[in-house]
Amino acid sequence: MDVLLILVPVALGLGLLGLLAFLWSMRSGQFDDLDGAGSRILFDDDVETASRPPRATRRR
Amino acid sequence: MVANAAPRAEHACAHCGAILGGSDSARFCCAGCARAHDLIEQLGLDGYYARRVLDPSARAPKPELDAGEPAAAPPEPDAQGIAAGHYMVDGLHCAACVWLIEQVLLRQPGVVSARLNMTTRRLTVRWKPAEAALDPARIVAALGYRLAPFDPARLAADDRGGETELLRALAVAGFAAGNIMLLSVSVWSGAVGEMGPATRDLMHWISALIALPAVIYAGRPFFRSGLGALRAGRTNMDVPISLGVLLATGTSLFETASSGAHAYFDSAVTLLFFLLIGRYLDRRARGRARGAAELLAALDAGAASVIGADGATRRVPGERLRLGDLVLVAAGERVPADGTIVSGMSQLDTAVVTGETRPADIGPGSRVFAGTVNLGAPVRLEVAASGKDTLLSEIVRLMEAAEQGRARHVVLADRVARLYAPVVHLLALVTFAGWMLAGAGWHAALLSAVAVLIITCPCALALAVPVVQVVATGRLMRRGILLKSATALERLAEVDTVVFDKTGTLTEGRPVLVEPRAVDAATLARAAAIAANSRHPLARALSSAAEARLGHAVAASDGVVEAPGLGLARGDERLGSRLFCGVAPGESDGGSDGPELWFARPGMRPVRFLFADRLKSDAAACVASLARRGLRVELLSGDRAPVVADVAGETGIARWRAAQTPVDKVARLKQLAGEARRTLMVGDGINDAPALAAALVSASPAAASDIARVAADAVFQGDRLAPVDDLLAVARKARRLVRENLALAIGYNVVAVPLAMAGFLTPLIAAIAMSSSSLVVVANALRLNRG
């Protein structure tokens, strides 16, 4: 059963990683515009002045 | 990729895709489109035309020359010299529109950033006013979209904060529930196999390590609300939840420390997880409803052009107008305040205030009311009433009085919860006392009591209502119906009487050419070419009638001069009022007295175009369908009796009342309420607003006056009435599903509680019972999406 001492922390660590990734993406406003984000990637390629959401206007 | 039906590219307008006339070699249907196309080409953004994907039913927005959108007062720059403007964008239909608007704005000098959120349709533009003067509304309007400025401070942000807090708690609870369940499953499968007590204890300790912080973090919303209720001397659904979760965690910790066989960490955390899902869905539905309401309120702030002592005009928000101010009301603009006309002759559309369809003639000395629309020439008006004395505030007062009278509606779930919490506490207490009396010892008695609290935790109950609400609002939203109030669905389901307004609700609310076939096609085309130069509603009606008859848009002819308030002239041809075209007052074919336009050409008899407010295409069908559902339909209108009688006859409404003032409408609704009728009021005018507030539940079309949309519980898009029928159908189905769900949840408790009281409940059985009941309830709610 010694293998548990490695596997349990590894499983928990991976889970935590996912949780942190979700919290981070929520904080950085990636869930604010679900409809627009999907198509935005198709259009931004050839434009040099692509605008990012200004951090100051973000809601917390 | 221009429009669907264009046989050859050169026959469709290069900007909006409207089909052009056969022999016409022009590339554009109108000057507005040409200008928009130029603007896009100049900025090197012609990629837009390749990128947009036109839905066959949706056309690219058609820009209006001289779009009369009032300029808002420019936003103040902040410390870095950057001003931020917030706008609502109307007319978006695909991502290419988003791209185009952002790029066009970004290429204006001084613009720092432009970001358009496609989901919320809100545009934020940040620019440096010191470098360049910028009016984003004007630029975007030139592309054919409409921009309405709004003040983000007027949208409450705290609600969003609550939503993200719930989502974070949900994420933490989900993580903890998944991991603890993983450990629990190994304990359960180990219990029948060879797992030693030491390994089991290790698993329990790791579970405790995850569960304790998770419960403390994710349980806060429940603890707070439960504590608040207890402090106020009440009890709500959150009290048994908090008690159950805390006791389950506490006893499990004790069991783990004393090396016991059962720990309920998984139950405690899974419970929180499910409950948070329900709570989050509920909050989101409420937040959306409130967001819709607040947006309408924020858009409400209109601006007026005040003429200063020096003769210059400046834009002032409507609420800041003072008594005696001179205001310029441009053609097509709304009158911002009650007042008296000082100079100018025009016609006024008063439908929104009185329900009257015939435009009223106004001249110096006429008294006009806020909310009416100036159809003809610009006029100057002296503000005669402001603040509390305007007709509008009178209406608002009526509305508030009516709202107070509306019985406080208690949501079904709350009514259930009020009964539920005491029963649960009593059951747990009885279990504890029973086992103590039976001599089981306080340890076993407490474990059974905790098991009762866990199993009765209203998991399924907390999901039963919000899931149905979310599915129902989602389904309505896809059909263009916006619910502004979270309790609207429940109130809609009880409706047994539907009261309609006439103008703008049952009818289109704008003039339509009567019998376009009475005039030959060449004459119609010629008149429409002149009419295309004007924004007057009658001229527009003529243009669209010609477009429908000829199958293509009529290009505006050159050299047309508009005589404000009278008509249009092109050389010797004249299109306009009877007087303007030199027609003798008595001459008239047909006795009808609707609004009319005359078209006079040298050497030919003047032609008369007669207009009427037409019924919405499915008005009669909708009324018939409502009657089939067993609903009583009534018509209350401010218009004259003969017109109302006609409409009632055509739609098959037996009960109608004409010439109703706002007070009369409220009185009638009160009377209906007195007869124990539950009324849905559908209306759009300013004069309907008090009635909308007085009814049990109300709906208004998206094209309605601001105040009516604010007062209504539901707003539906499009110029059809079918959404009213949909609204009632979905609400009734949702009510049935909610009841089924509640029955399922309670039925589950009836089976599971005796088990828990008898002490048979192991953590495994608790986990299975809780998850399965929640899944059944969710699956049942999803049935609403079918059929």
Image (cartoon, rainbow, N blue to C red):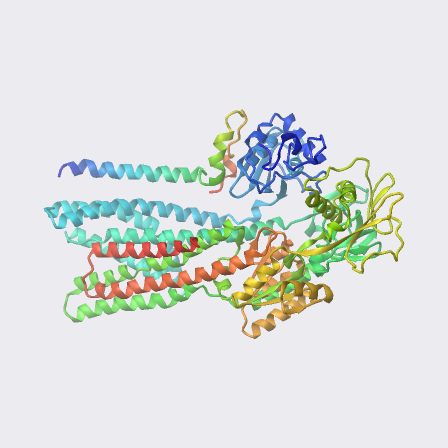
Residue B712: horizontal and vertical position, in percent? 58, 58
User: Looking at the image, which residue is at 63% across and 58% down?
Assistant: B505
Nearer to me, B709 or B177: B709
In the picture, measured across the screen, residue B283 lies left or right of residue B558, that is: left
| Above or below, B278 relative to B110 | below
User: Looking at the image, which residue is at 60% across and 49% down?
Assistant: B298
Report which quarter residue B575 is drawn in: top right
In the picture, measured across the screen, residue B251 lies left or right of residue B660, that is: left
| Above or below, B5 relative to B644 | above
Q: Is residue B234 visible?
A: no
Residue B753: horizontal and vertical position, in percent? 25, 64
Report which quarter residue A10 is drawn in: top left
How many marks are shown on the rendered structure? Answer: 0
Nearer to me, B17 or B664: B17
Residue B278: horizontal and vertical position, in percent? 38, 54
Quarter of the image that includes the N terminus of chain B: top right
Nearer to me, B730 or B651: B651
Q: Is residue B46 visible?
A: yes
In the picture, measured across the screen, residue B27 lies left or right of residue B569, that is: left
Outermost residue, bottom side? B675
User: Looking at the image, which residue is at 52% across and 58% down?
Assistant: B727
Residue A31: horizontal and vertical position, in percent? 44, 40
Quarter of the image that includes the C terminus of chain B: bottom left
User: Looking at the image, which residue is at 87% across and 40% down?
Assistant: B572
| Above or below, B28 relative to B542 | above
